[in-house]
């Protein structure tokens, strides 16, 4: 990992933090909406796609709603 020197422009760091906050909020809202419609949470780990079903079950088999 390469270490990068801190930039002198602190306004840039504040703007980046604001963008990350907005993005995190959008992801949270999308997850809540998907859960409401029965769409499982999807993520990729070690080259495999996993789904978290509304029951809380973790599976690597694509659910019917995703076909």
Image: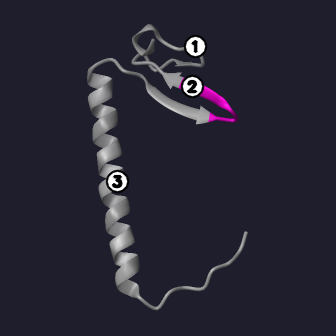
Relative height, residue 9 to residue 45 (above, below): below
Q: Residue at point 53% right, 14% down?
A: 62
Relative height, residue 54 to residue 3 (above, below): above
Residue 61 is labelled as 1
Element under disc 3: helix
How far is disc 1 from disc 2 in space, using C-alphas? Answer: 7 Å
Relative height, residue 33 to residue 15 (above, below): above
Residue situated in front as seen by the camera: 40 or 12: 12
Residue holding disc 2: 50
Q: Earlier in the sequence, mark 1 or mark 2?
A: 2
State the image quarter where residue 60 is shown. top right
Residue lying farthest to the right in this orientation: 1
Q: Position of residue 19 (x, y in %)?
A: 34, 63
Residue 35 is labelled as none
Q: Residue at point 35% right, 76% down?
A: 14
Residue 23 is labelled as 3
Relative height, residue 39 to residue 18 (above, below): above
Quadrant location of the N terminus? bottom right
Q: Position of residue 3 (x, y in %)?
A: 68, 78
Residue lying farthest to the bottom in this orientation: 8
Report crowding for label 3: few under 14, some 14 to 19, many 20 or more residues within 10 A (C-alpha).
few
| Left or right: where 47 falls relative to 18 | right
Q: Position of residue 50 (x, y in %)?
A: 57, 25
């Amino acid at each position: 990992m390469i270490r990068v020197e801190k930039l002198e422009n602190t306004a840039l760091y504040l703007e980046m933090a604001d963008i990350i906050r907005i993005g995190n909020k959008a992801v949270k809202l999308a997850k809540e909406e998907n859960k409401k419609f029965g769409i499982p949470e999807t993520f990729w780990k070690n080259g495999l796609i996993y789904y978290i079903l509304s029951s809380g079950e973790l599976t690597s088999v694509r659910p019917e709603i995703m076909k």
